[in-house]
Image (tube, rainbow, N blue to C red):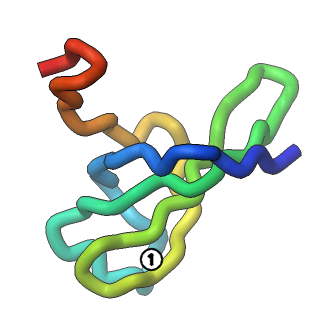
Amino acid sequence: MITQLAQQIPVTVLEAPSGVQLGNGRGYCIAWERHSIDWHLLWIVVLDESGQVIVAPNKYIRVDPNWTAGRA
């Protein structure tokens, strides 16, 4: 099931699928997909530098610090 996010989440992607130029890895998560019975998420991310839309597993995503949420 794919869930579109009402607010984009700023993230850093640590590793990308083969053939994708990751650049600095920064982008915005616009949706995610629950991939398995174990609730392993696949993050759908638009990369800042290239504008590419990629899908990255949960273990390769880091949420950026957010002062408004108290996560500085």
Q: Secondary structure at mark 1?
A: loop
Label 1: how many Cα within 10 Å (few below 14, some 14–19, many 20+): few
Residue 34, compared with residue 53, is above or below; it is above
The C terminus - image quarter: top left
In the depicted view, which residue is nearer to us: 52 or 30? Answer: 30
Query: Tag 1: residue type?
Result: Ser
**Residue, x 77% and y 21% (percent of image)?**
38
Observer-nearest residue: 19 or 55?
A: 55
The residue shown at (43%, 85%) is: 19
- Estimate the x, y position of residue 11 in percent, counting from the top left: 33, 47
Compared with residue 72, is residue 54 higher up or lower down, i.e. above or below? below
In the displayed structure image, the side of residue 12 where residue 30 appears, left or right: right
Count up the numbered dots. 1
Q: Examine the rendered structure and indicate whether residue 16 appears above or below residue 37.
A: below
Quarter placement of the N terminus: top right
Q: Position of residue 35 (x, y in %)?
A: 78, 41
Residue pointed to by mark 1: 18
Q: Is residue 53 left or right of residue 9?
A: right
Q: In screen coordinates, is 70 left or right of 32?
A: left
Q: Residue furthest top?
A: 70
Q: In terms of image quadrants, where is residue 21?
A: bottom left
Q: Residue at x 24, y 24 (%)?
A: 68
What percent of the width, then of the height, locates residue 8? 48, 50
